[in-house]
Image (tube, rainbow, N blue to C red):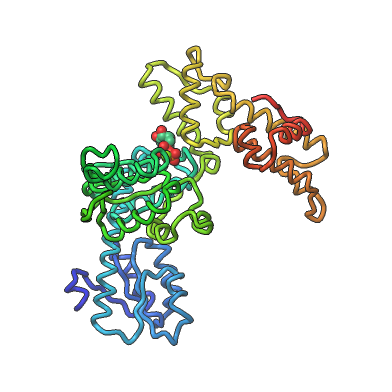
Amino acid sequence: MAASRMGFVPLSAGTVPEALAVLREQQPVDLILLALRLPGGDGLKLLGEIKALYPHTGVVIMTAFATVPSAVEVMRAGADDYLTKPFGLEQLTTVLHQSSRRLHFDLQSRRLHERLRTERGMGNLIGTSPGMEKVYRLLSKVALSTHPVLILGESGTGKEVVAQAIHAYGPHASRPFVPVDCCALVPTLIESELFGHVKGAFTGANLAKQGLLAAAGGGTVFLDEIGELPLDLQAKLLRALQEKEVRPVGATHAVPISARVLAATNRDLNAMVAQGLFRKDLYYRLNVVNLEIPPLRDRREDIALLAEYFLERERRESGALHSFSEDALRLMMEYDWPGNVRELQHAIEHACAMSSGGGLHAADLPTQLHEFRTSYQEAAVSANQAGEGVPNAASNHCNGIVPISEIEKQAIIGTMRQLGGDKLMAARLLGIGKTTLYRKLKEYGLPLRT
Ligand SMILES: Nc1ncnc2c1ncn2[C@@H]1O[C@H](COP(=O)(O)OP(=O)(O)O)[C@@H](O)[C@H]1O
Ligand SMILES: [Mg+2]
């Protein structure tokens, strides 16, 4: 009764086989109210079967809690919610209501996903690796709401493109998308950029200025490099997110805002919180949903797709007809891409400029790719001469005991590889002097020039 009043069309089954028959014949079933103790079978087992066969069907478990170890177990087994017996009409209605909202939301996000899905990615995003598939699934969900999202990933992984996609596929796509680079401006300027100021608020403030959070209307403000936001502005931003209003510099009254906030960083905010460099409360507020984009070296299957995509763009712009040679593709596949997709894009642009027409060869690609290959090969050779396995020499030592010198060598080679041979940066990150690094590289027989 309660269910049909809410728009559900109820079906019933008294035993496990009956339930399975109903599911088979009546697909799609949106929601199942499932008792754990059932004639002809075990409810928890049936739950597993339903979730495997019909992943989009919601299941609410009805149970007297003496009969199962815990609610946690039921949820872990895939239930979407549970009702403890005895329950009243009100509890049932609440659970049904929440379930129908969730079902509606899931359906919307699946539709969005299907609509934007292409053979080589989703929307403007290229990549079909499991890591990117996960990004697309999450993206289709978060785009529909207006909560803050924290986008994480190394520099060049595509954080800004993902932010633009969240905005573009969301309910307010026609409103502005406003990126703010927290690292590009001095703190006083970020404050007036974000929150606005009144006329005469500070020297040079000859006119009042509306802040971006207010100016974005119901659009999206993208706070890039949020980790660089000074602590006092973090407090102000938190207030803005909580109260949905901002106070322009020098103003006595607050101004309401309705913009969605997306934030991105390549820093470890959790560690920054531990060090007192980032406000915990703001971190929690922004991190309700986070979307982590994996580095390119962890999704190598996307390299060729992306390379092809950037090449196509070059073709369209310059009209030149190029295609990759085998050796160029191999070199790109081997490289570690510390600068991720951005570095790949630049490498293709570089290769197109260098190419003398016809194909794009390995020789047309930037030097860091070649150096990486050389140093990697030399490291492999020298490790082999020392009678060790490659590339993880440490695993060959007996009883897992590894000499410190070996660990040091691996750390140096690994860092140089990740940084594409940037010795100055490598020395800084390893905490050793540049001359020490040079000496060590020479010892290992690695190339010194960059
Ligand atoms: N998955 C992707 N598909 C297509 N282009 C991408 C993808 N990821 C990144 N890019 C491109 O790479 C460059 C860097 O992306 P960006 O979003 O600015 O990175 P980040 O903000 O993480 O440093 C941009 O030109 C962007 O268009
Ligand atoms: Mg960026």
Q: Nearer the viewer, residue 424 or 386?
A: 424
Judge from the rendering whether residue 239 lies leftward or rightward of residue 301; answer left or right: left
Image position of 285 with respect to 46: above or below: above
- The residue that appears at 46% across and 29% down in the rendered structure is 345
- The residue that appears at 76% across and 32% down in the rendered structure is 439
Residue 440 in view in this figure: yes
Q: Report which quarter residue 35 is drawn in.
A: bottom left
- The residue that appears at 31% across and 53% down in the rendered structure is 109
Specify the farthest residue to the top.
356
- The quadrant in which the C terminus is found is top right
Image position of 99 with respect to 233: above or below: below
Q: Quadrant of ligand 2?
A: top left
Q: Nearer the viewer, residue 118 or 199?
A: 199
Judge from the rendering whether residue 327 lies leftward or rightward of residue 96; answer left or right: right
**Could you say where residue 385 lies in the image, as x and y percent from the top left?**
82, 35
**Could you say where residue 195 lies in the image, as x and y percent from the top left?**
28, 48
- The residue that appears at 54% across and 23% down in the rendered structure is 365
